[in-house]
Amino acid sequence: MSTTTFDPAALEQLQQQKSGRPWRKKPARFTASVTLAVVIPALLVAALFLTSDIPVPILLVVIYLPLQLIASGIAAWATKGTRGIADSVIIVNAIGASLFSIVVLVSVIGSLVVRGLRALSPHFLFQNSVYISPSTPLDYGGIGHSLVGTLLIVFIASLISVPIGIATAVYITEVRGRAVPYVRFFVQAMSGVPSVVAGLFILTIVVATGAFNQSAFAGGLAYAILMLPTVARTAEEVLKLVPDDLRTGALALGSTRARTVLRVVIPAARTGIITAVILGVARVIGETAPLLLAAGNNDQTVLNPFGSPISSVPTYIFNNVALPYPDAVARAWGSALVLIILVAILFTLARVLGRGRVGR
Amino acid sequence: MADVSQMGRRDLQSAATSHRGDRVFTRTVAGAAFTSLAVLAGIALFLGFQAIPAFQSQGLSFITTTGWDINTNPPTVGIFGMLYGSVLLAFVGLVIAVPASILLAIFMVFISPPRLSKILTNLIDLMAAIPSVILGLWAFYILNPTAEEWQVLLNKYLGWIPIFENTSGNFLGTPFIAGFVLAIMMIPIITAVTREVLSRTPPDLINASEALGCSLWTMLRYVALPYGRGGVVGGIMLGLGRALGETIAVFFVLKLVYETNWDKIIESGGGSVATLIVSRFGEVSGPSELQLLLAAGFFLFIMTLVVNVIANLIVSRTGRLQK
């Protein structure tokens, strides 16, 4: 009986088939059918594209996708039998979904670079827009005032939201009071507040009551509402990573609870907390609606955080997008490129710092 | 003094907090921890308070009718079309984003080689980081002409289906385009949550299903997807919350009309509460109109709060089951 004899070679073959890397050592028949299943529909559709004038969306959705599904189905059936067909449908659609997302992303980033570079120049970053009308050529004017405004607003928002966010995280991980689940719940609920509602809220309490104008301070308050949940949740994750030995060690040395947190736990999590702040800033820096409502707009460089309306990069983009002047639109693309570069720098910083923490 | 060895953890904790500085510290931290509650309550109270006069002048018709006529006295205003429009846009977005995100997550967890999934994860994170004003700019100049072409084709070949009717011949500013932009914003959120729960499927279950002869599809159908269902639903709700509150990107691609567009998704014109607020705010005629906008903001807040709370409850419950 074959079942009684132990055949190491057969076992090895079985293990190879079920190994964690099933793409290694494919049989020739598999490679051939997959290649055919990929090449034939692509060639057919390419031929149709060149010879007929069927619109591209129809070509892709109505002809290529079903063709690819059928071809992959046949290939799967040839190599794995009928159960392979459902798998091939999933795989083809999953690859399609991934390609779709990549195409969208490349289109967004690519268009930013292609259309934004024209406006970029040193004076675009440093000059403000006084005396600049939408039809002024790109040789003059820039977004210096908006960059200053964004920095000021983000700085004010950080001043408010970072201490509160860290305190919230400290309450959850260090104080561990009875209300921890509720605090967590409210922080999560707060992260869902639409940005326009945050702007309206600040508008009602700060601007409409007459306490302040539309200003960097009001904009910073609105940003702080949006930043707080991100800072609190990231800081919570980070404080959880601080080893308990440090806490008990500090307490055993006679340190008070407050001193333990302020002198031991938070310094130990320093890089992580910086990451939390950076992520919070990256989360809000492109928000437009709250600033339209709470910070207003201005062509001049404003340094006073309380007095007057102030410009920011997102509101600058917003005001220039739909203008019927090519140079104004080019300015919008240019400042969008600057904004996405800022966001990318922030995320890279957060990632690099985060990696350092894990590596230690 | 009691024997130290008999002191429980709680006693040690109370011993540690008996210091006066510590009491101040604990109270300060606890106070700060409730800022989020204070802000939520503040938003509800302040906007709700402002909504009262709007309700007094408009009655229930404020949320059951559609229109924005500020010149009559009292102004006749209703935001039903806007509330409905927000839901319609989010629904169109979900129809596109949910299958795409789940397939994307399946691809990243079960199909692609690890190195490729890592790259894809970074790309999806990058997609989540694109500010909505930039997405609006892109949609206005790059997506609009392409989407117009798609919609003309949809109308030409599927126009007999009521939702693909278009009588005006104008294919810009449609709920479809706005929903598509919302889908691009939801895909990273839904994908991230789905990827997370799918990758937490216990490997034992996957190995067992493979040992029983499951193919990829049967494994997904009977093991991974049922296991991660709660998380996937929660992720979808989180995406929905984001879509309902989205303002700026929709502002650029949707033609805001003050009538209810029930189901004509490729007909120009639709509604969105968040966009209504921003677009009316620029030319607000006086305090009474501002009050109406604040009332609209109140309903937007309540709508997104409910969706988000449900989403978070679902996500946290699945998280607990898995631990």
Image (cartoon, rainbow, N blue to C red):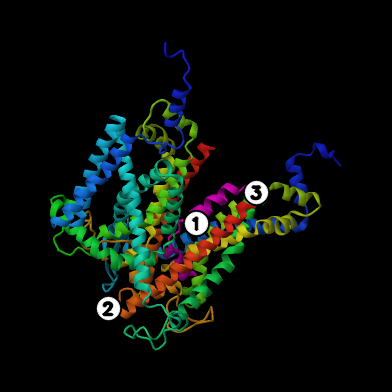
Residue at 42% of width from left, 29% of height from top?
B210
Judged from the image, the secondary structure of the residue bearing numbered disc 1 is: helix
At x 29% / y 29%, what residue is drawn?
Answer: A81
Check disc 1 and report the residue beneath it.
A190
Image quadrant where residue A78 sits: top left
Within 10 angstroms of label 3, few (less than 14), some, or many (20 or more) residues?
few
Q: Nearer the viewer, residue B46 or A306?
A: A306
Magenta stretch: helix, strand or loop mostly: helix
Q: x, y (%) of residue B28?
A: 66, 59
| Quadrant in the picture for the N terminus of chain B | top right
**Residue range highlighted in magenta:** A178-205
Are dots 3 and 1 on a single chain? yes
Count residues near mark 2 (Cα–Cα under 10 Å), then give few for <14, some for 14-19, many for 20+: few
Amino acid type at image mark 2: Pro
In the rendered image, the vertical position of residue B143 relative to residue A148, given as above or below:
above
Give the residue pinned by disc 2. Answer: A324
| Subunit that carries the residue with mark 3 | A
Task: Name the chain under label 2.
Answer: A
- Quarter of the image for residue A38 reads top left
> Could you tell me which residue is drawn at 52 percent across and 65 percent down?
A224
